[in-house]
Image (tube, rainbow, N blue to C red):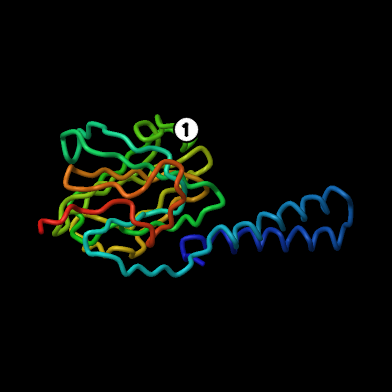
Amino acid sequence: MTKDGLSFIVGTFVITAAIWLGWYVFPNPFVLVLALIFSFFSLFNLWFFRDPERNFSGDENDIISPADGTVIKIDRVYDDEYFKKEVTLVSVFMSVFNVHVNRFPVSGKVDYFDYRKGKFKAAFNHLASAENEQTVIGIKSDKGKVLFKQVAGLIARRIICRAKIGDSAVRGERFGMIRYGSRVDLYFEDNVTVKVKMKQKVTAGETVIASFISDK
């Protein structure tokens, strides 16, 4: 269980216990239904905020997925804030059924960070990348640069990101999460080969999204 969800888990369990106590003292159908609904949400939160261990032992050139989910976009786009040129974009959609803990895709130094308030369009809508609330993180590694975004979705109203400029990023290490459905966008220069396909299921900290082209 991730510590970022502890307040939600404790909160819903406390409310649920209080409602069940109310039903015990003043039993009626409405309170019973309410107690059952909150019991469901309590168990759902306990499951949603799970944080399984992940291990990766691949090549040093590999860029791993920062999120669990499904690849919903692979395209060439123009990035005007970090690379300032045309780059490759890979988008991963995270449904409410996925683990939502995010991990660094590469090791290196965080050399760019920005937080932007925005809308809460459905995360599978590609307009979300430009218009929704998001954090933008750039990492400069020994192999090259990677930019990625945590993008809030229709239900997700809270982005948690502990990365900041100057931090040392370690590939596969946890750096935050997005609560209740969202997406993560990754941007690469031309020195990278994409390894995933559309609609492919990916796992944070394990699935290779792309690889830097070796100089050898």
In percent of width and height, residue 83 lies at: 17, 40
Number of labelled discs? Answer: 1
Q: Secondary structure at mark 1?
A: loop
Residue nearer the viewer, 20 or 132: 132
Image point (38%, 57%), residue name: 207
Place residue 106 in its image quadrant. bottom left
Against 151, is 12 above or below?
Answer: below
Question: Is 212 situated left or right of 201 in this image?
Answer: left
In percent of width and height, residue 10 lies at: 59, 64
Against 174, is 194 above or below?
Answer: above
Image point (39%, 39%), residue name: 133
From the image, tell me which residue sits under label 1: 121
Considering every residue shown, the one lying at the far left of the view is 216
Residue nearer the viewer, 23 or 86: 86
Q: Pointer 1: residues within 10 angstroms few (<14), some, or many (20+)?
A: many
Considering every residue shown, the one lying at the far front of the view is 216
Image point (15%, 56%), residue name: 214
The amino acid at mark 1 is Lys
In percent of width and height, residue 175 lies at: 34, 60
Place residue 152 in its image quadrant. top left
Image point (53%, 60%), residue name: 49
In percent of width and height, residue 69 lies at: 46, 50
Place residue 169 in its image quadrant. bottom left
The C terminus sits in image quarter: bottom left
